[in-house]
Structures are given as C-alpha cells and as structure tokens.
Amino acid sequence: MASDAASTAVVTDIAVGGMTCAACVRRVERKLGKLDGVTAEVNLATGRARVSHPARVTTDELTSAVEAAGYTAHLVVPSAEGQRPARTEDSTEADAEQERERLLITAALSLPVLVLSMVPALQFDNWQWLCFVLAAPVAAWGAWPFHQRALSGLRHAGATMDTLVSLGVVASFCWSAYALFLGGAGEPGMRMPFSLVPSSSEGMAHVYLEAAVGVPLFVLAGRFLEGRARRGTGAALRSLAQLAAKEVTVRRRGSEELLPIERLRVGDVFVVRPGERVATDGAVTEGSSAVDLSLVTGESEPVEAGPGTSVTGGSVNVGGLLLVRATAVGGDTQLARITKLVTDAQAGKARAQRLADTVAGVFVPVVLALAATTLGFWLGADADRQAAITAAVAVLVVACPCALGLATPTALMAATGRGARLGVLVSGPQALEGLQHVDTVVLDKTGTLTSGHMSVGRVTAVPDGLDANEVIRLAGAVEQGSEHPLGRAISAHARRAAGDNPLPAVFGFRAAAGHGVSGHVDGHEVEVLAPDGTELPASLRAARERADEAARTAVLVRVDDAAAAIVEVADLVRPGSYRAVDRLRRLGVRPVLATGDRAAVARAVAEDLGIAEVHARCTPQDKAELVRRLRAEGRRVAVVGDGVNDAAALAGADLGIAMGTGTDVAIGAADVTLVRSDIEALADAVRLARHTLGTIRVNLVWAFGYNAVTMPLAMVGLLNPMVAAVAMSLSSVLVVANSLRLRTWQPSPARQPRPRSAPRSIL
C-alpha cells in the first residue's frame, strides 16, 4: 500500500522567476525531468511550471531543481479566487518598476552615445572619450541583468538568450576600449562615419560603443514593452479575481454584521443591496431584483431574481434589496471554478509550441557555434578584424528565441481570458485545437436545446369569447393550488403576464386525478382539463391538432361550462438555440440531435431548428455508440450535454462540451464548458478557436521567419549590431501585440433565423 501511495501522481504548480526566452523554458523542463518520475510543462508567458510527480518527490525537491537550473521558484498555492504564487502581486509590480528605472537611466546615458556615433557632423574633439564614459555604466550596470543570468547559466552549464546579449555587449565594449587605449581611436580629432551596414576600416580607429549601449537599451525596452503586454494577456484572470467580494453583510438574529468573506459559511443569510456584488453562490430567500451576470457568464441581459432563484457570486444586484442564503463558499463557487478552469487552460501547451520549445532548447548553442564560425571564417579569409567582430556580434545579438517561446502562450492566455468573458471555458490548448477541427456536433435536447422545464407556448382563445390574457389569468389562478407540472407551468406563465398584479383568489378548488382542476374565480366557474372526448369549436379543434403535430401537450380551459381556450404546454426551445444551430451550420458544422425523449417530440424540435439527423429514445449507451459510429465515419465529433446520461458520450467524443448549468459529472467529462444557459456560446467558441489557432500560426511563422532571414544577413556582414538589437526586440513585441488582439475579439453578429414552426407564444 505504501508503494502505491508513493507512486500516485501529484500535480504541483510552481512560479518560476528569471525566465526570458524559450531556451529557459526548455532548460527548466529538462532539469525537472531529471527527477525520477517527474514530467513538467513550463509556460513562458505565465511564468508557471505545471509539474506531475510521484508523491514521494517533495515540493522542496522540485523547487530546488528549478533553483539549481539558475532560476527562482515559489509554490503556487490555491486560494478562494483560484491559484496564486506564494509571493504577492506587489513583488511583480516592484520588479516592473525596477525595470522601468533601469530602462530610463540606460536611455539617458545611451542616447548621447547613439547620436554622436551616428551623426559625424556632431563629433567634436575627444567626443569618443565622452561616449566611453557614458557607455561604461550602460555596459556594466544597464546590462547587468543579462550578465547576471549569463553567469548563472554558465555555472549551471547552460546558455540562454541572455548569454547572447551579454557576449554581444562585452565584445562590443571590450573592442572599443582596446581601440581607444591601444589602437589609435583615442586620438583627438578622430572622426568615425556611421552606416547601417557594417564596413571595414583600416587600422584600429573604429569603436562600437553605439552597439555596446544600443543592444542593452533596445533589449531592455523590448522586454519592458513585452512584459507590459504579457501582463495584459493575463488581465482576464485578474478581472475574475476582482469579482470576488472581500466583505459580506451577514444577517443573524435580526441584526447585520460586516464580516470578511473568509468567515462566510454555507447556510448563512447575507444582504445584497442595490449596486453591490453577490458575495457568493446562493439562493434568494427574500426580495426581488434584476441581477447582472455579464461579467461572470457573458449574458448581456440582467436576470430577474426572486425567492427560490439561484444567484451567482460575483454578479451585480442592479435592482432592489435581496436576502440570499449561501449554498457554496470559497473554492466551491462557480466564480472560483471558472478561475481555476482559466488558470489550468493557460498552463497547457499546443502541439506547435512543443515543437518551438524543442527548437529553442538547442537554438542558443547553435547560435554560439555560428558566431564562432562567422568570426573564424572572416578572419581566415583575411578580412578586416573590425568587420569580422562586427559580423560575429551581430549574429549573437540578432538571434532571438524569445518570440518562439511567446508565440503560443500569449495567444492562449488572451483567448482563454476572452472566452471566459464570453461564457466559454476551455480546458486547454488541446480543446482549442479540437474546436477548430470539429465538423459534427451531437446535441442533447432537454436542458441544452430546450429550457428543461415545462412552459406555456401558444394560447388560442375562442374568437367571440374572453381574450387570451384573461383566459390565462383565470386558468393560472385555479392552477395555483396544483402540483402537476402542467399546472405549475400555466400558473407561472399567468404570474409573469400579470406582472405586479396578484392573481385572483380561487374558491372551491377541486382536483380530479387524471382529469384536471376546477374552481370559482372572479365569479366564473373555471376548469382546466385534458381536451380528450370534449366537443370543441373549430378554432380550438385546429389548435389541438396543431399541438399534437408539434408534440406539445394541449390543455383545455373551460369558463362557465363553455370551451374558452387551448393552451399549448411543452419544454420549449431556447431562443438562442435557433441562432446557435444556424451559426453552426454556417461554420460548416453539422448538427445532430440525440435525445432520450420520444420520437414525436424529438422530430418536432429538430424540424423547428432545421436539424436533419435525429436520434430519439437514446439511452446513455446509445449516445456513446452514436458518437463511436460517427467517429468511425471519419467525422470530428463534439458532444453537447448537461446531464449524467451525457457523460459517457462527452468522454468518448473528440471534444466534450458541457452546459455550465448541468451536472458536475457532465462538466467533469467535458473539454469545454458553456457558462451561459444557452448554446449560442458554442458558435462563439468555434470561431474563437479558429481565430486563436490562426493567430498562433502567424506568430510562429513570424518567429521562425525572422531568424531565417536575419541570421544569414548577420553572418555575411550586412547587419549592424545595433540594428540587430532593434530587430530582435521588435520580434518579441510584435508577437505579443498580435496575440493581444484576441482580447478585443468580438463574435460577428448573426442574422436572426425564424423558427420553422408557428411562433411559440402570443403573450
């Protein structure tokens, strides 16, 4: 038993500090992978390592392994808002401020050197010595982060992007110092021409101080901008964390007490005033109001809440006072689960990123070899030593595996954050890749395409009798005392139609099992019953036949012994289902309906939505077998469901998609969760996935293409080291900026398809 426990896989998240490029990622993964039974995925954009390890390997061993690679390591501890590193966000802000100060001081010292070196007309007597004095602190202090990390890598027998930058700065500065002190470049009156393309010169009267200051300046500037952009891609997680309340007003024994949210317990009743956030998931016990769920589920319209209604923590009360009984706290709330899903999704890697990280792992040693080869070739060809050193330095500086490491994770962070704001939670990059290629989606009916509870559809009243509104008011009053699902649907519909006006009282209420209910309301004898065997006027007879054809239940309302109306009751199709199916079809995704309901109902819903392939009376095993058969035909299948009976099909599909209102079993078996209560978010998810994977492809093409073009130019001496530094910095910034566009991605407006059957309600 002990050995089994020791071999149990444990997943630990570690915040890794000091990583600057994809080579760092590969180095940390390799160091952790040397521990017995340990595998790790390191994400450059988030600075996180997700480590799977046996229980016998302690977290101290994991952090020690990361530190042995030359980086800092801190465990990520769970919190009520999701996951966070043991260090606070203040340290991140402090690091960013230090980077900003270093950049500003470096810029102040470097700009005079760059101007004097690049504009010969401004070069006065002994200008080169002023530049040397200004360049010395830049090459030492300004570039110190690069030197420090390069030395750390050297101690651990590794090399990263910082190694290349450090070598480039040291080579440029040392050559310039040699030229000034021993090579004649320090003579008063020396003038030095500048060219974007390196050129040889006779003797030693040429200095490269502009490269010695330009390389650290532009790399620091690029990383500062890159850091700001990377922090922007994580804005979704921070905004989710900000939705969590810090304090809550709890009502106990008639008095109110303001408590920290950590002291709230399940069962406590708390107060939500207008404009306040709902502190945690709960059920309304008193009061009525509209609740804005847009920041939590992406639903644009506020939802009415009253006694018995469930409310979600993080939503905003936009109406009256509510008393809510807490049903979940801490990590069990929907907001905490959403935050965890987004965090987990951002920790993964797409297949393309694994390839990029593998390339970056060997990239730096290859660049060092190329730089040495370039220097040796130029010197061996009797070229000018200045030109040889310039070409070698340019090779060192222009090489940039940073863009490779950022191509996928920044896009993934931005996309998952945007998806969360739209009500779409993906489990990771594999889910996004799966969404991109889906061509068939199997849809459950009850609770997915339909609301999952009985509702009143159409009300057809006798033309020369009471109008439909009055009939439903009388019928709803009688049904207030009924426990039958049809009766509850009619009563609820009548209360909504009445608005603030209460339904009239019923006297002499009678219920006959299998027949209906009756009673006196406002001086009328009202009966609500099945229409079977009852003689009906032509208009009501047509309404009953229409209901039968649509697989809805027809209910007859009689007032004063005369047939007054036919009420159609059914589990109605969600309004968003029409748009969702239409948009999926336009995206090239074929909808298939699979339900456990009877065939007539399934056909009616499918016909209404325009779904050609229908499977009724499906058991959970039938749904799973349907998925297997579709996959055997070569289709890429996604399954959408919300219940326990959908779990097997969800797990067996290429992609499982659960409704956020469904069971925990269904959500646990799914790759994607739709937080909103309708499936229109599914079409948004497919389009977002395709857009995200397209962005990643563009990023990787740019990252690989940049090196493929600039490295040969540097090796043949056509790239000035300073220009190389600018190009290297811009490559990373452009990749991150391209990913940031996903933060503002908007679903394209869809046309409003009309139901294929008659309108659902006239009230």
Image (spheres, helix red, strand yellow):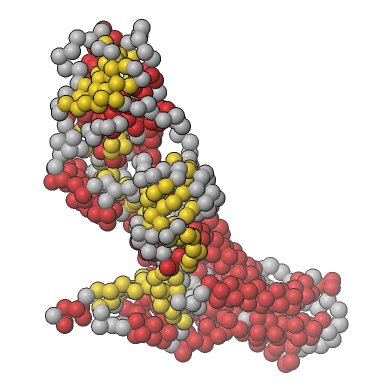
Q: Nearer the viewer, residue 425 or 712?
A: 425
Number of marks in picture: 0
Residue ID at (70%, 85%): 137
Q: Quadrant of the N terminus?
A: bottom left
Q: Where is residue 617 drawn, in percent x and y?
A: 14, 36
Q: Nearer the viewer, residue 545 or 28?
A: 545
Q: Where is residue 522 drawn, in percent x and y?
A: 36, 20
**Dividing the picture into quarters, in which one does residue 561 lie?**
top left
Residue ID at (27%, 54%): 664
Q: Where is residue 21 drawn, in percent x and y?
A: 49, 72
**Dividing the picture into quarters, in which one does residue 94 lie?**
bottom right
Q: Is residue 763 left or right of residue 612?
A: right
Q: Is residue 644 left or right of residue 378?
A: left
**Could you tell me if residue 11 is visible in this image?**
yes
Residue ID at (22%, 75%): 8
Residue ID at (63%, 74%): 97
Q: Nearer the viewer, residue 660 or 697?
A: 660
Q: Is residue 485 above or below residue 366?
A: above
Q: Where is residue 48 drawn, in percent x and y?
A: 42, 71
Q: Residue furthest bottom?
A: 182
**Dividing the picture into quarters, in which one does residue 345 lie?**
bottom left
Q: Nearer the viewer, residue 606 or 188?
A: 606
Q: Quadrant of the C terminus?
A: top left
**Could you tell me if residue 333 is visible in this image?**
no
Q: Is residue 615 left or right of residue 403?
A: left
Q: Is residue 503 left or right of residue 393?
A: left
